[in-house]
Amino acid sequence: MERANRVWAALYLKVKTVIVVDLVPSRRDLALSHGATHAFDGRSPTLLHDIQHATEGLGAEYAVEATGVERVLRTAWECIRNLGRVVSVGNPGPGSRTPFEWVVLLPVLFLWPYEN
C-alpha cells in the first residue's frame, strides 16, 4: 500500500503524467489501477526512451527514487528534464558514492548522507 500512497499523492497534486518504474509486474499493475498513467519495467533497455516518449520528449519534471540503489538514482537523474528535480528518499548506506559529479549539481542544494 505504501507505493500506492505515492501515486495518490501525485494525483492529489494534480500531476498530469504519473510514471511508475518497478521490477515487479504486480506492483506496476497496482500503480496503474490506482491512477498512474504509465508503468514501466526498470529492466527495460528502452526505459529512458519510454519515459521521454511519455513526457512528450521533455523528460520528467520530478523523479522520486526510493531504493538507495546507485543505478536507480542514476536513472532518475537521466530521466528528468532541464531544471527537473530528483528526490531520493532511499538509503544508499554508509560509504556509498553519488552516481554523478557534484559539479553537475552546482548551484543546486543537494543533501547526501554524510560518512561518519
Image: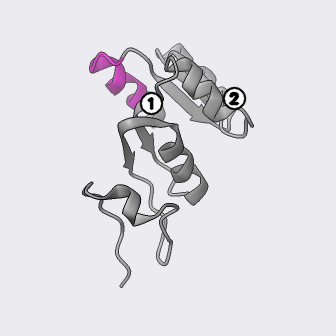
Q: Residue at x 30, y 62 (%)?
A: 111
Q: Residue at x 52, y 37 (%)?
A: 79
Amino acid type at mark 1: Ala
Q: Quadrant of residue 84?
A: top left
Q: Quadrant of residue 86?
A: top left
Give x and y (percent) for residue 60: 44, 30
Q: Front-most of 33 and 101? A: 101
Q: Quadrant of residue 26?
A: top right
Give x and y (percent) for residue 17: 44, 18
Q: Which residue is mark 1?
A: 60
Farthest residue in the bottom direction?
116
Position of 86 with respect to 111 (left or right) is: right
Amino acid type at mark 2: Pro
Quadrant for the C terminus in the image:
bottom left
Region rendered in magenta:
5-15
Q: Is residue 56 magenta?
A: no
- 10 Å neighbourhood of mark 1: few (<14), some, or many (≥20)? many
In terms of sequence position, does the residue under pointer 1 or pointer 2 come before the other?
Answer: 2
Residue 72 drawn above or below residue 7: below
Position of 79 with respect to 50 (left or right) is: left
Q: CA distance from mark 1 to mark 2?
A: 22 Å
Work out whether residue 97 can be spotted.
yes
Specify the color scheme. one colour
Residue 107 drawn above or below residue 30: below
Give x and y (percent) for residue 112: 35, 65
Is label 1 in a helix, a strand or a loop? strand
Nearer the observer: mark 1 or 2; the answer is 1
Q: Is residue 9 magenta?
A: yes
Q: Front-most of 12 and 53? A: 53
State the mark number for residue 25. 2
Residue 73 drawn above or below residue 80: below
